[in-house]
Image (tube, rainbow, N blue to C red):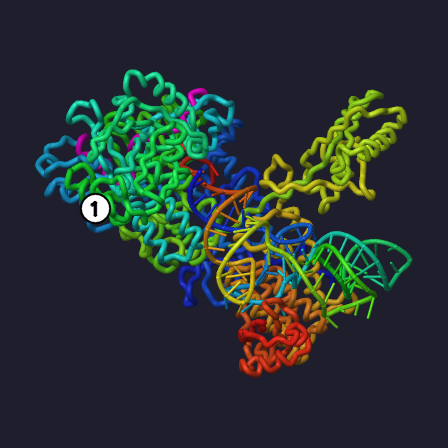
Amino acid sequence: MEYNFGDIEKKWQRLWTEQGIYRVSNNASRPKYYVLDMFPYPSGAGLHVGHPLGYIASDIFARYKRLKGFNVLHPMGYDAFGLPAEQYAIDHGIHPAISTDNNIANFRRQMDNIGFAYDWTREVRTSDPGYYKWTQWIFLQLFDSFYDKRENKAMPIEALVRNFEKDGNAHHPCPGDTALRFTAAEWSAFDRLRQQDILMHYRLAYCGYGEVNWCEALGTVLANDEVINGVSERGGFPVVKKKLRQWYLRITDYADRLLEGLETVDFSDAMKEMQTNWIGKSFGAEIDFDIFGQPAGSAKLRVYTTRPDTLFGVDFMVIAPEHELLQTITSAEQRPAVDEYLTYVKSRSERERMAEKKITGCFTGAFAIHPFSGLHIPIWTSEYVLAGYGTGAIMAVPCGDQRDFTFARYFDLPVTNIIGDHFNGLEANPTKEAVLQNSSFLDGLVMKDAMVIAIKKLEDKGIGTRKVNYRMRDAAFSRQRYWGEPFPIVWTNSLGFGIAEALPETALPLELPHVEKYGPGPEGEGPLANVPEWTARHLETNTMPGYAGSSWYFLRYMDPHNEDSFCSRAASDYWGQVDLYIGGAEHAVGHLLYSRMWTKFLYDRGYIGHEEPYKRLINQGMIQGSSRIVYRLELDGSGNIDDLSKHTPVFVSAGVAAMQGSPEFHELVSLAVRNIFSNAGIQLESINVSPLHVDVNIVDGVELDIEAFKKWRTEYADAEFILEEDKYICGVEVEKMSKRLYNVVNPNDLVAKYGADTYRMYEMFLGPVEQSKPWDTKGIEGVYRFIRKLWRLFFDETKGKVWKTDKATEQELKCIYRTIKKVEDATERFSFNTGVSALMIGVNELTDLKCHKKEVLDRLIVILAPYAPHLAEELWHLLGNTTSVLDAPFPVVEEKYLVESAKNYPIAINGKTRTELNIALDATQQQVEEIVLADDIVKKWLDGNTPKKVVYVKNKMINVVV
RNA sequence: ACCCGGGUGGCGGAACAGGUAGACGCGCAGGACUUAAAAUCCUGUUGCCCGAAACGGCAGUACGGGUUCGAUUCCCGUCCCGGGUACCA
């Protein structure tokens, strides 16, 4: 019987579906285990081989856990709101809901092909009103909450109002406006508009103003990566910063808990570090500097510094170009220069401002006054200081900060040395260990000790305060777009001003209205501003961003059909945290932080019982494309050759193309061309080789399928080829997997050719899940061979079934137990590539042993099942089992078959391995020394010398030191 | 620029806690079976040197240093590639 993956896989996929074998219950006596994939955005391009990498890994683990006796939740859904669908709608007039549905259907077909163990009855789509009803509901809870710093948790805004009525805001300083103070009496005297205005400064979801990339020509707001060199990626129109009304989430209130929470979860250190750095908690001081020549009582220049100890090393100040004081303080002489500089800055995206090595800046003409020395310090403005961080102004200490130093050097500003020998005059030294000099009352102090003293002095003088600062900003939570969740907010008075009122829960979901056009509304508003019925109701015209729906979807899977709640407490208490979350590292700081914040918020408000969503996180690497290149000749010379070769394109094989420029190359090409065009008279004057991407799917390894190539493009139908060894060899380039580069490989094609089981295993065999690597289809043959080799343990081409019920030998049992142990270990530590390799080694050994014994093969099938579920199920039933292999118990390793009494030790002389000796594992140091020193090869290397010592590491190695 | 990750044969990778570098697979080369092909099987495959052979030598995990009896693994510095940098998902 032949291995026919097509029949086997189709059959089991059908039966599994019919039997609802992947249905998961919220009630089980078995322990729960929740395996989650980051759900995909259903793009029009469909899945390529990069997507399923994580899905296959999680599927293997979910199946493995099921074999281990767990009740496993393994759901899938779609992050279905997003910009591409909206752009597609703008371009093609197709409603995003329709294109999204089509894309989802396509994704689903592709996923079904691969045989994932998803419980599809739990599928969620963020764009489904039944789902976003609850996204809106959670938003309303955020809107209706503030962060109580005393309780260190989110509380209903009602509690705040009651507190205001009693004590004013004495206990709750305003996070949105720290200067705001009022008493109970004042509060009660405020009118409703003023009260609501104040409350807005406290809400966890609040409305404010923020700068966006505004493109007047497109009439729309652009993402940073849609802006290239100050102009729009599409169309190349100018882009400027514009202040727009925006919703925000007060994630900064959760900064400390997001940091603390990292200690309770199992993420990689790199991931924790990235999130920690993103939050960027720093301790320092805010210091107010008087500005020279400004009237008394006018604004001071407030800077934030993490190094108050360097107060006397300040040589200049730098304020962000957006700083509100800039206009006020700029001197008349400097105004033209500053204005010119601002025009330049306005055209630059934040990304460019940060990435640029080039130093730019402009003197404002103003001076700050040093609070202790009284010196006048020039105030500059430069784009390297960002408005959003700290106070948007810094005191520059060039001897201690490299960027300040570079800036000082560039503009020829003086550098004061306050750290003596620690500063070499060539680069800044950020040390905290130096003893301060030139620092007045701080002289002689070690820098790290000086910090406290400096702050104390500043506080005494009333010009500075100790300050904890976060690099993280509040999360912009609105988009001027159509294809997103509408905000369940009505503006009384006028749209976008006045009072934001929450819609009642009964009005949810507030569904997206149908529109005919997706273009932007007036004044940078979203498309919803064009809908008269919408604006007539004074509904908010912004929509929520992509990460809204993905911030809580893992909870909806637990209770996907609940119409009374986003997720019942019973369901979330049962499933709790996601035990294993697999997804791309590109979501490290966005999605992961937002969803962690939402989880903490829902926990604070008592809706769920845990405050970290993901117990363990694995980041899958990216699959890069492996492009194939063909080399087309551009010819010039006699015999009208340029025209001829335009109509009959000529391609040279990679090896030939590599000779480009050499006389041999010229000769070889000339000869071939004369041949091709049957014109011996052709003389080539110039030969250019232009590399072109060719569809990787018509290349076998690196060998081009010439016939397929001719069919690929009509203009290549008559193409001619200059071969090497009768083959056309393509060039190889590793780059992003993208349609444009023709290097996209569709899993469907591979499944059709080799079967899902082979495809799954190959994708794992490629390398560690967490590592990025290029895709190369060629190697899949090896896995296919392995699967057929495994099949032959059960079936022989001529003899048919070959398995027997004889008792297994000790050797055979050793082999299978060794394999079980290796596969189990590998799976446990998500090393699926070595898991596959362990299965290969096992099958190779059993084949060598000619082992066809059911006792052994039974076990082999079960450990194979997570990796190749269809094949395992088929063989499982063929061996006579009547229940599914999905529910077989994972075989237990009998350790007694694995214990060895001796080991082949590598014997090294001075760290270089020279020989091997078989020595008992329980040998003592003395016995080992005797055995080793008696060995001829060791004697040879000792060359009569007495060894200094013999290093003996049990079960590892032996090293003789001479 | 900043933060994080990575760099090992012709290729993907293995080496799990500092202990035999190159498991497993691809590719390639040679061979067996076959009229032939496919399929399958066997042998070899880091480089260089010596040699009839070797279970002979030297070098070798991006590069330069260091720690150690011993470093792909730890530390310092450099280069290159990938991800992220707040409205791509």
Q: Observer-nearest residue: A367 or A164? A: A367
x 28%, y 26%: residue = A324
Which amino acid, by three-letter code, is at mark 1? Ile
Q: Observer-nearest residue: A461 or A134? A: A461
Q: Compared to A910, does A416 lie above or below?
A: above
x 33%, y 39%: residue = A473
x 79%, y 22%: residue = A643
Which residue, given by chain and number where applicable, does mark 1 sit on? A453
How many C-alpha atoms fall within 10 Å of the one at disc 1: few (<14), some, or many (≥20)? some
Residue A10: image x %, image y %? 63, 55
Residue A475: image x %, image y %? 35, 39
Q: Quadrant of residue B15?
A: bottom right
Q: Is residue A845 visible?
A: yes
Chain of the residue that carries numbered disc 1 in the rendered image: A
Residue A20: image x %, image y %? 52, 58
Q: Is residue A925 left or right of residue A746?
A: left
Q: Secondary structure at mark 1?
A: helix
Q: Compared to A164, does A25 lie above or below?
A: below
Q: Is residue A514 visible?
A: no
Would you say residue A138 sits in the magenta stretch?
no
x 52%, y 31%: residue = A88
Magenta range is A193-217
Q: Observer-nearest residue: A864 or A763? A: A763
Q: Is residue A108 left or right of residue A730?
A: left
Residue A482: image x %, image y %? 42, 31
Q: Quadrant of the N terminus of chain A?
A: bottom right
Label tally? 1
